[in-house]
Amino acid sequence: MASFKSSSNITITGGKFTTYEGDRITHVYGNLVQCGHPEQEQEKTESEQYRLIPTGKVCLQRTIADTVVERDDVQEWGSLKARRRVSVARIDGEDSEFLHIGYRGPDAIKAYQKDFEEFSLKKNVNSVQLFGYNDWNKLPALVFYDAPVPFANILENNKFSPILRAYVEYQATQALNEIWIEPHSGALRKGPFVNKSLPDEWPLHIFGLRSNATALNDRPFLPLKAYHDPNIVLEYLTRLLPARDILRGIGWQWKLTQKPASFEESVNLLSSLPGTIHRRDNQDVVARWPGDNGDWYYGQSRLQGSIREVMQEKKVLDDGSVR
């Protein structure tokens, strides 16, 4: 016992005493020994549930992403000035690879704390799982099990394949930049936002395939290596989904092509747009809607770059224009 440290040849007969070691209490009554804990045990904090990993115990193997934490669709992240550096790492004393996310910039600690608060309280198979942390204010970092891969990287490497878009519409429920792939099983998990450069106006959010009633946990996943072969992905989809769902998933891959134009060119182009498909490179017409063009009309899709007060006081006129 700590009470008799470095003592030897001690004999106690009929004694009664109590010792304290941390939150452990030991009562001795003659030959009877009772061990227990205080009745009012202090509740452990989130950081005590995970391993504190010193910076010197981490060996970064390769960097897979380096992005800003700022995101336009979540207000609480919109003003933070920091970056996430995402790397595959080895931890001293561990056999497997881990995902290491380091935070840099003026708001690095705030970004780290927000991610820690979210993922320290998540423990389920649909989320990346936290292994440990380092809260040193010079190099804050989070470490996750299994070294998952950002789905945004896969999309970018496959030129934003519409077939992959259909697959992820079937499998996932979160924003594209929050999807991570578990390398061994191919399972999709929710993880920290990776602000990769998606094409202009490419929808970040998953809309889902409405006719599919299969529970998410019951859907088989494609292995990671299959993502690079669109034929394998398409074969998978045709086995599990009706054609209309596959086409709907592909349809969510739409994006805008921006091209400078004079006022005269703009007027001419706008007058011919309803029910018309143009080539992306030179805007030549390649197909037209055979029905009545009166069913087509212009309407406001979204406002971009306007200050909040202007957006709140906007007026939509009868012709659909905004003032």
Image: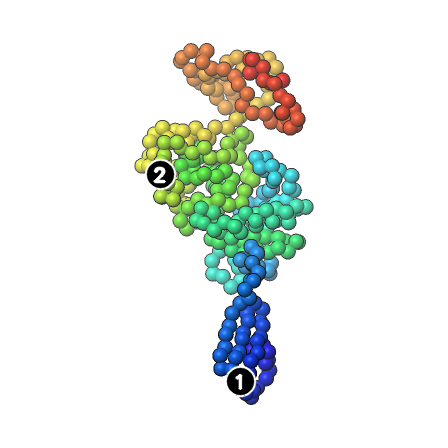
How is the rendered protein coloured?
rainbow
Q: Is residue 198 left or right of residue 232?
A: right
Tell me how far mark 2 sits from mark 1, CA to CA: 70 Å
Instruction: Name the residue at 52% across, 79% down.
Output: 29
Q: Is residue 179 visible?
A: yes
Compared to residue 207, the image places residue 268 above or below, namely above
Q: Is residue 89 visible?
A: no
Dot 1 amino acid type = Gly
Which amino acid type is shown beneath numbered disc 2? Thr
- Across and down, in percent, residue 226 comes to 39, 43
Image point (57%, 23%), residue name: 259
Residue 256, placed above or below residue 185: above
Tag 2 residue: 214
- Which residue lies at the image location 40% right of the left edge and 49% below the top edge? 185
Q: Secondary structure at mark 1?
A: loop
Above or below residue 196? Residue 57 is below
Residue 237 appears at what percent x and percent y?
35, 36
**In this orientation, which residue lies closer to the viewer: 1 or 157?**
1
Report the disc number at residue 14. Answer: 1
